[in-house]
Image (spheres, helix red, strand yellow):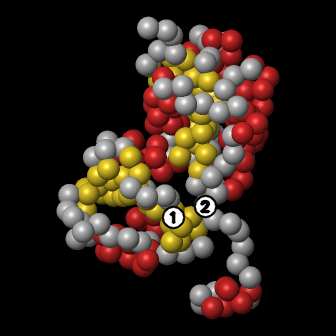
């Protein structure tokens, strides 16, 4: 069996991290808190690669959490992955942020709700690791509720919006509101993709924003009870 090494980048939220997958072992490190990912990501990658005893020439791919998430964070992860991929002639593996969260939860039937701010969540349902529908951006009151029991719900959207917790109470048996996106799960999904040959050229890698704008107009803020 051929060796498989890859680097994964996750900066979908303020809690950024990277992970090195080295033949099935994962070395994960977190970005410093309170400093922009654009300032800390490359030094952290270099230090972690040295710690893992790997050079970029030893990698078979670069992976990044493609989104949804913070617009700035997604652009940073994609841009760094693309830059390193071009410099070292490596393919890229975009991984869905919520897909990685579902994997990290270790549940079989998983509801993922990531706080999207502005009174909304990024929301998706997964069964045995597969999404049941594309990720949506919705208000907690509009989130779809499974008609079966024994689901696991995860993500900080549950803590940010108590009404979502209440809405899902009839179908959820386990809660993980503390679970956040993490590069370790991105690396695990990316390794499976790499094994299947599912990679893209660096030029074709792109973030998955889901939301098409980041600011409300004055009229929209007033309509939802906000201030002008």
* Other-residue count near label 1 (Cα within 10 Å), few / some / many at <14 / 14–19 / ≥20: some
Q: Is residue 182 left or right of residue 146?
A: right
- Pointer 2 or 1: first along the chain: 1
Residue 61 showing in the rendered view = yes
Residue 163 at x, y percent in the picture: 38, 76
- Please name whichever residue, 211 or 179, is drawn nearer the observer in this view of the structure: 211
- The residue shown at (46%, 62%) is 123
* Vertical comparison of 89 with 57: above or below: below
Quick one: quadrant of the C terminus?
A: bottom right
Query: How crowded is the residue under tag 2: few (<14 C-alpha within 10 Å), some, or many (20+)?
Result: some
Please state the horizontal and vertical placement of residue 198, each as a whole percent of the image: 55, 31
Q: Secondary structure at mark 2?
A: loop
Please state if 114 lies on the left or on the right of 226 as rendered. Answer: left
Q: Is residue 50 visible?
A: no
Comparing 81 with 17, the one in front is 81
- Residue position for label 2: 210
Q: How many marks?
A: 2
Residue 104 spot, x, y in % from top left:
39, 41
Give residue 120's mark.
none
Residue 169 drawn at (x, y percent): 26, 70
The reply to whether dot 2 and dot 1 touch (C-beta < 8 Å) is yes
Q: Which residue is mark 1?
A: 136
Q: Quadrant of the N terminus?
A: top left
**Residue 29 placement: quadrant:** top right
Q: CA distance from mark 2 to mark 1?
A: 7 Å
| Front-lying residue, 221 or 143 | 143
Please name the residue shown 72% across and 48% down the image: 75
Identify the residue at image location x=70%, y=68%: 213
């Amino acid at each position: 069996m051929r060796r498989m090494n890859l680097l994964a980048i996750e900066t979908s939220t303020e809690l950024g991290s990277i992970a090195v997958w080295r033949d099935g072992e994962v070395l994960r490190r977190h970005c410093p808190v309170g400093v922009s990912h654009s300032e800390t990501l490359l030094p952290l990658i270099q230090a972690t690669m040295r710690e893992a005893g790997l050079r970029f020439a030893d990698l078979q791919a670069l992976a990044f959490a493609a989104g949804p998430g913070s617009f700035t964070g997604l652009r940073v992860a994609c841009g760094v992955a693309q830059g390193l991929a071009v410099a070292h002639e490596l393919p890229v593996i975009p991984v869905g942020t919520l897909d990685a969260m579902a994997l990290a939860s270790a549940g079989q039937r998983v509801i993922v709700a990531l706080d999207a701010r502005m009174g909304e969540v990024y929301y998706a349902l997964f069964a045995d690791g597969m999404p049941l529908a594309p990720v949506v951006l919705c208000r907690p009151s509009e989130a779809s509720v499974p008609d079966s029991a024994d689901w696991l719900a995860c993500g900080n959207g549950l803590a940010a919006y108590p009404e979502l917790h209440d809405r899902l109470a009839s179908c959820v048996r386990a809660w993980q509101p503390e679970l956040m996106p993490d590069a370790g799960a991105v690396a695990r999904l990316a390794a499976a993709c790499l094994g299947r040959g599912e990679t893209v050229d660096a030029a074709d890698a792109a973030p998955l924003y889901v939301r098409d704008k980041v600011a409300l107009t004055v009229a929209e803020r007033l309509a939802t009870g906000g201030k002008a």
